[in-house]
Amino acid sequence: MKARASDLALQQSGLSAVLEDFLAVRQATLDLCDGLSPEDCALQSMPDASPVKWHLGHTSWFFETFILEKTIPHYRHFNREFRVLFNSYYVTVGERHPRPERGLLSRPGFAEILAYREHVNTQMEHLLRRRGMLSQELTDLIELGMHHEQQHQELIVTDLKHLLSRNPLKPAYRKSPQKTSEATATTQKWHAYPDGLHHIGYDGNGFFFDNEQPRHRVFVGEHELAHGPVTNAEYLAFIADGGYTRPELWLSEGWDTVRAQGWIGPLYWEQRDGDWTAFTAFGMQKIEPAEPVCHVSYYEADAYARWARARLPTEAEWEVAARNASADGNFADNGLFHPQPGQALHADQEPSQMFGDVWEWTQSSYAPYPGYKTPAGAVGEYNGKFMVNQYVLRGGSCATPRSHIRATYRNFFPAAARWQFSGIRLARDS
Amino acid sequence: MKARASDLALQQSGLSAVLEDFLAVRQATLDLCDGLSPEDCALQSMPDASPVKWHLGHTSWFFETFILEKTIPHYRHFNREFRVLFNSYYVTVGERHPRPERGLLSRPGFAEILAYREHVNTQMEHLLRRRGMLSQELTDLIELGMHHEQQHQELIVTDLKHLLSRNPLKPAYRKSPQKTSEATATTQKWHAYPDGLHHIGYDGNGFFFDNEQPRHRVFVGEHELAHGPVTNAEYLAFIADGGYTRPELWLSEGWDTVRAQGWIGPLYWEQRDGDWTAFTAFGMQKIEPAEPVCHVSYYEADAYARWARARLPTEAEWEVAARNASADGNFADNGLFHPQPGQALHADQEPSQMFGDVWEWTQSSYAPYPGYKTPAGAVGEYNGKFMVNQYVLRGGSCATPRSHIRATYRNFFPAAARWQFSGIRLARDS
Amino acid sequence: MKARASDLALQQSGLSAVLEDFLAVRQATLDLCDGLSPEDCALQSMPDASPVKWHLGHTSWFFETFILEKTIPHYRHFNREFRVLFNSYYVTVGERHPRPERGLLSRPGFAEILAYREHVNTQMEHLLRRRGMLSQELTDLIELGMHHEQQHQELIVTDLKHLLSRNPLKPAYRKSPQKTSEATATTQKWHAYPDGLHHIGYDGNGFFFDNEQPRHRVFVGEHELAHGPVTNAEYLAFIADGGYTRPELWLSEGWDTVRAQGWIGPLYWEQRDGDWTAFTAFGMQKIEPAEPVCHVSYYEADAYARWARARLPTEAEWEVAARNASADGNFADNGLFHPQPGQALHADQEPSQMFGDVWEWTQSSYAPYPGYKTPAGAVGEYNGKFMVNQYVLRGGSCATPRSHIRATYRNFFPAAARWQFSGIRLARDS
Amino acid sequence: MKARASDLALQQSGLSAVLEDFLAVRQATLDLCDGLSPEDCALQSMPDASPVKWHLGHTSWFFETFILEKTIPHYRHFNREFRVLFNSYYVTVGERHPRPERGLLSRPGFAEILAYREHVNTQMEHLLRRRGMLSQELTDLIELGMHHEQQHQELIVTDLKHLLSRNPLKPAYRKSPQKTSEATATTQKWHAYPDGLHHIGYDGNGFFFDNEQPRHRVFVGEHELAHGPVTNAEYLAFIADGGYTRPELWLSEGWDTVRAQGWIGPLYWEQRDGDWTAFTAFGMQKIEPAEPVCHVSYYEADAYARWARARLPTEAEWEVAARNASADGNFADNGLFHPQPGQALHADQEPSQMFGDVWEWTQSSYAPYPGYKTPAGAVGEYNGKFMVNQYVLRGGSCATPRSHIRATYRNFFPAAARWQFSGIRLARDS
């Protein structure tokens, strides 16, 4: 999944750059475990989420299964039983331990998993140092493994947040940063886009996932896009206006979900005596009006948009706008794991906060691009088989590593999912 | 939802044409009950399906609620409690009796429902005869009510079929027609389409649903479309090749469904001693190789397509092809309620069986067309609120009234639904 | 299951008495269908309940399977497929149609079921008229079949009541009788019983079920029994005192059920603006204070007793008291299908209303009597296999045929069941 | 719940004996955690089971809530939030953290729980050393707390076993002991008991639970009791004879459970290539024919008994026999946590292995003894509220502390429960 030019560069620089990247990614994963206990890393709070420990093992399993096993003759596994334990959903690789039972594994313990990671790192290091020129396929797989691990870094943060939220002690994951100044919620502004035929999908020289290709033409009509993501202040107005009690604002399935789940606000929000608070990386916190609203489902994003007489953007509209937008943002690298207020409006020519802070729901169902072909082998199970009943999110979040995201990147979750850092950017027809 | 030109025509001809249409549609609904017992019409076999009796009541309720109540001063309801009993999902109209409990209503009985229908017919007749010129809004609503009733005609057939299928006695709904000649399964042929920007959506002078508009531009890439729908013979080859046991052919959700539901073939299919039979409108019947395969889910359609090294068409691709295709076909008007084999291949310039026989799954998620606005009032609940997690089907089936369908018509069902007459037409990239 | 002396009597009188009884029981079943529509008889409102039609078929199936099939050479079945359709739970007889799907059978229709009953009646009549002396085993089975049918007569009433209660139209099953005088709720009175060793179980000459034997000795301690069943007035006081909101009054499982089901009163009770009404055989009715409380679960009976500083009687205590009590009462024969107030207290020497009106929960788990042996063959499935996790009720109800009940009769239902006419009689330790 | 004589002894010896017992019980709980990791102690494998950590906390909470809080003025809690976290089911004490969510608590961690235990121990030690004469009520509560902790010791073993069994790595809890000699399965022998009126229930001077009283008279008929518990060899014969495939051997509910759960043997048993193995405290082990069968439900015990032409004993029959039986046995004190084969048959006058090895299902539903009164206060929630839909087990198991059990001790579990060390002793009518 790497374009040719980049590969050449990679091979010219020898493998040392790959090794450096590899070790950095692996270390970043461990950094996320700072301050966590073995128990924090072992528990599973819902079938959608996995224990931190499992993510640590699975990302190592990926390198072991797709690279080490296939490259090193007589490769000695750390533990052959991990082949089943840490397989997520790769049917072609063999049996899998059932996902909802990942929280039933007290063994291997945290220390053993760290040893497993070390074993894999060492083997990878040997491979990258001694092997001279690796095949294109192999370097591609190593790079895929690093991006795969970055995806699990984000899941470690979101899954752990969900687990801690279920604890009545409401423990904090990270220390709250000092506030430098009082942010003020900005008045929404719109950017206009004319109609036109656009090329959509990846065509650069770097890494990309198979679902970002083939690059293809899409006709996009005239429309407008909001300058920034919807803020808590704006979302509170929606709630105050009966947002969660008016069926006419909701998709039918969304309304059924609101009723069945008893939703009265975004995930992690609680109301006591009229005041809203939310569970965050810093424990329970007052809702900050200027911050982007977060942990909303597609249903809520869609209902909010209807209430605001707008709609969600398509993924093509989003991608067209993102091309010129700043890729700077509040990412996992900041160590905050919490969305931040946008800056005051100057004479910005482009939408702001397109990247980082919160993933932005689009109205687009997750589907193959025209001409998409599932890659051969287990890697073919990476994306294609999930292309039904999910919706595309764009732009990354405060839990996404900065180097992981790009304008063509397609994330996807079911319409009811809320435990990701998912927010809302509005679009409207001109 | 009617364009102006047609309305003028309608009003010039007076209302007698509307009345004639109205009475014909109402009678067609009753004709579907020929040979059914009160019990056949009262039972509900699953939450997705409704009792025949309920359809008879609900279609009358539609005219009573949206036309009679609002037009006739001091309108006397047949029974005011029916307002709740026969409301399907119109939240803005008021309370509703829960859908999964429609099969708990032994009263009103079949005879009383017929009396209710008669009452509504009489009132409608008075309205149409005496009122002279009706408002545009009202004539639109009457036409909507007729198309609404036609949709329920199809549901009567599919819901009843499901109910009868659950009975170990496997009763027939209609007498099997005499076979005139042995149809032979034809070899698949492909029609090629160049890329281009197309206008998609309704722009004629007749009736259409809100979801068929606004007409808008879509870029469609170069591709091919199969001449006819996939036949039973072809589908049997998929089964024989392990179709239902090979996860790599399936969407992940589809595979989970196959396993959880124990699917081994389309709905209503049974295998005994190696022979396949299916429950049909004529009771249990041997599988006819030349007939289009029917009662498959989106998951099965997608898996079949993958196996056949093809894919499902997008709804735009389908619509472009359908414009020139024959609108003739095997519809409910034939009284067969069962798909028929296609004709032998001549030098057909266009795909065949685009209309009638089986609804054709497209790969397109059901979504609003760009610029779509939900109509005001209860009618706004007709289509828009279902635009999530459903997939578009096109072309109508053997249970669709001929006058109900057109090239721009968008039907939609969840990916797991199988009790409609849903089949497969393949597309592929050139 | 018939004692010898009675059998002799039966055979001396020829079979004409049996035939007369048989036809009377069969007719009584049909009488319960007076005024019901085919739809009323076809629907199933919950897995625990069966359609009336099914009861009509199953009771005929019983005679066909256990008597006609085994006695008449080359017996011609009305329809061989009914063997599966109308088998309830007799595993040894062969396959069964699943209980929760009894409401999916629109065919056979009501008329066909009546024809089936007629067919069985005719065959039984032939058998009883022509066969001269029948074997003891056969006459026993015929008598069992009649008592079996009486049990289903009661279920027809309770299952139909449940179905009609789910209909928002709240239809009445029978016309409400005229009230002759205002009954007043009586003050509770207690009857004292000394300790002693008692023989428990059937030892008469009539019919009995296997679970009423062997007669055996039970030591019963000193205790008291309430004069009459708990009234609505008394139960309303329990509710008013927070009965349904105080966990300390409830068994743990009972409290979980109250919370999960949202119980706030007996089944069929509704509260509007502070007034309690209930769905009855006469439609919705005001709660009558002097009537015995009805449609309560074991959990509610137990909680009420704890609140009243009493307890439920054991089945031995109940049986000892019932031996001398009047067997007169308000039974199905009255055609009311609703409990009636007790008479004013005179100098009654024995508890009143022990029979009829409401089944009385005992604290005794349904278990085999010491020395109980399961009968051989399918009849062995009648009682024994249900002897776990059910509780014994005694005395019959307003839906029980008078000739069906006796002091040793053991009815049994799970602790959460409420759709039978189940009430409460208190006991207490001296 | 302590008789007077014992109390006097207790008080004469000062409180030092109580303190010694207290510290020994508390230490025994910790000993069970030897070799366990923080993760082993934090996970919950099913709603019925709790994490080891929770048991450690809850048993401390018991002393804190019922003794320290009420006795020490201005008692300083270790952490006030533990009041909710570690309340099991004491509604009267206040809110409780939901049982199925005990496995969602990564905090407090194992080390913090140990500190909590230490805090409670220290406070209890102060109380017992400094307070001179404690009230009768308080010494009773302390003794109750110790027996309560012993109950949780057994649950720690059974809950942990269940958790480890769900791990594909099948980790061992303890090292398997060396086998000294080959035990041989003994031929079953029966002991006869005449009929008679017996006093049942506790009347000694030691500790007892409220459910063992009042002592009362029960008439027990003539019967026989098996010499030892059913062995694996005997149970394998039942399986080989189609035990799990013959509905006529089962209670109806039992058969439904067998089918729904896919049971083919006791819990933890697996069959590979015809050989049976089971998960034990020592990991996966071959089935040892001479050992008592273990981890069977009431349903299985009942079906086995029916197959063996016997039945389960009543709890009165069991208690009568246990009075003269040896109280020696294989208890938790041995550290094996696995049932052991019985000794060869000599001329034993009494049934053997009545105590220890496996709990023995009785046919008796768990019910209050005649005259039973729920104690006042929170302690009243200990036993009484569970007296429905559970069955009594007697005699203790290899996971029960020796000092915890006695002939009148009543354990109870639902009929489907299998994760306790539950086995079978047969009875039969003479």
Image (cartoon, coloured by chain):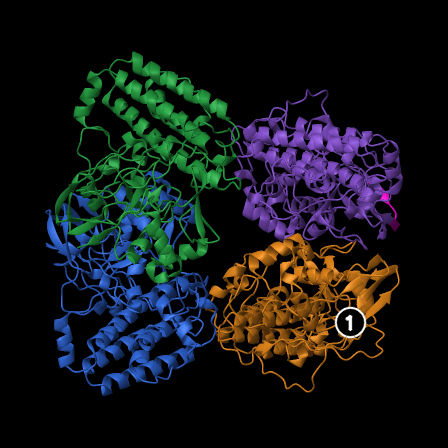
Chain colours: A green, B blue, C orange, D purple
- Tell me which segment is drawn in magenta: D191-198
Q: Position of residue D174 (x, y in %)?
A: 63, 25
Vertical position of residue D112 compared to residue A236: above or below: above
Furthest residue to the front? A181
B39 sits left or right of B4 in the view: right
Vertical position of residue C291 compared to residue A338: above or below: below
Tell me which corner region of the image, top left, top right, bottom left or bottom right, holds residue C257.
Answer: bottom right
Q: Residue at x 43, y 30 (%)?
A: A86
Q: Position of residue C150 (x, y in %)?
A: 65, 71
B35 sits left or right of D218 in the view: left
Tag 1: residue type?
Gln
Q: Which element type, helix, strand or loop, lies under badge 1?
A: loop
Q: Position of residue C228 (x, y in %)?
A: 76, 72
**Quarter of the image where the N terminus of chain A is located:** top left
Q: In which chain is the residue bearing label 1?
A: C
**Residue that carries the numbered disc 1 in the rendered image:** C188
Near mark 1 (Cα within 10 A), the count class, few <14, some 14-19 or many ≥20, is some
Along the viewing direction, whichever of B250 and B40 lies nearer the viewer: B250
Along the viewing direction, whichever of C428 and C246 lies nearer the viewer: C246
Q: Is there any visible trace of residue C53 in the rendered image?
A: no
